[in-house]
Amino acid sequence: MSLQDVPCHLITGPLGVGKTTAVLQYLRRHAGRQFIAVLVNDFGPVGLDGQIMNAELGPEAGKQTKVMMVPGGCICCSAVGGLIGGFEELSKLQKIDRIIVEPSGLAVIGEMIDLLMQLQAQHGFDLRPVITLLDPKDLSRPGFTRAPYYVRLFEAADILVANRTDLAGPQRTQEFQEWAMSLYPPKLRIVLTEQGRLDDEIFQLTRPRQKGADVPASLEQLASQNVEFLPMAKAGSPAVVPRPKLSHTGHDHAGGLQWPAERRFAFSALLKLLNELAAAGLDGVPLARLKALLHTDRGWKLLEIARGAVHERPTDYRRDNRMDWISEGAPLDARRFEQRWNDALTVPER
């Protein structure tokens, strides 16, 4: 059987946050209606999570589920062969309605997504938005929002889930929600739940780069917070982009651009242009702030202009290429700005 257009979901999160519980909840709920394949990765050699999942499934769900264990390391690195072989085996099944991949809590998620995108090109399955579970109580831990491990998780997430809200309490849950709403760029969904319960609607969402894909749920919330929605200049981009109104100063102007995730930029030329913009702006219009998440020939990067300086670091974000800016005194010509990037920074496709 071909895996063409079979939905594939990556469910991530730190060790012990409830990923396996969330997967089991979904499997039991759809027993008898869907045949679901689950690829479970354990860091250890035994494959304990997969064994637990098989033991926990009732007879009805077990008949409609194929649990495949990928033990012996993370499937983003040392156990890559196991994941590739797993999809080869799935492609031979006569019937499959959905695939769920649960990596180890130690996996590097950006590399995991890159690998799944390569496998998607080979097998034709439909890679859906990344679902990441976190514990709201972790937000109170010193350095949580800056620790590289957690930064990788919440930057890669398309759907950010606060699990165990019943144990976290209302104050920490509210703090989590406010923090999640402040992340750049907006998540497709911010979900508050307990005991790993995820609504079916989450599993119907598609990645934004695809035709007819969903826009962040927070757009509706932003609309009530003095935000304009402007048509994208580039054909095939998402239908709207949020732009904060900055009329409280009368001198600041915001804008943004987006490209598909497959588009790559030359990192050296990128830094050169950003330094030019930081020093002189565009056509004499100064840039007060610029933030970009871009796919480069040196991997995915978060790039910023802040207080006249350029900053860059790796990121596990993979949804699309995007850039937002605030200029001073006058708006930038977004079309001319985009053309300059298109002309100078595109890495030819191989």
Image (cartoon, helix red, strand yellow):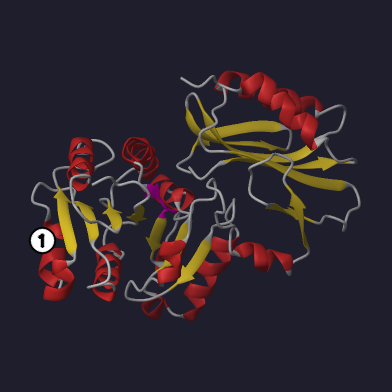
Does residue 322 lie above or below 238 as drawn?
above
Q: Residue 124 sits in which quadrant?
A: top left
- Whether residue 58 is visible, yes or no, is no
Is 248 covered by the magenta stretch? no
Residue 247 position in % (x across, y down): 87, 56
Does residue 336 lie above or below 45 as drawn?
above
Residue 215 position in % (x across, y down): 59, 57
Q: Residue at x 19, y 35 (%)?
A: 81
> Which secondary structure type mostly characterizes the magenta part of the structure?
loop
Is 128 covered by the magenta stretch? yes
Q: Residue at x 49, y 51 (%)?
A: 207
Residue 7 position in % (x across, y down): 36, 54
Q: Nearer the viewer, residue 250 or 294?
A: 294
Q: Residue at x 27, y 45 (%)?
A: 2
Residue 72 position in % (x across, y down): 14, 43
Q: Nearer the viewer, residue 237 or 289?
A: 237
- Whether residue 331 is visible, yes or no, is yes
Does residue 271 lie above or below 128 as drawn?
above
Q: Which residues are magenta?
A: 126-130
Q: Nearer the viewer, residue 14 or 256?
A: 256
Q: Residue at x 20, y 47 (%)?
A: 90
Find disc 1 in the rendering and name its residue: 51
Name the residue type under label 1: Gln
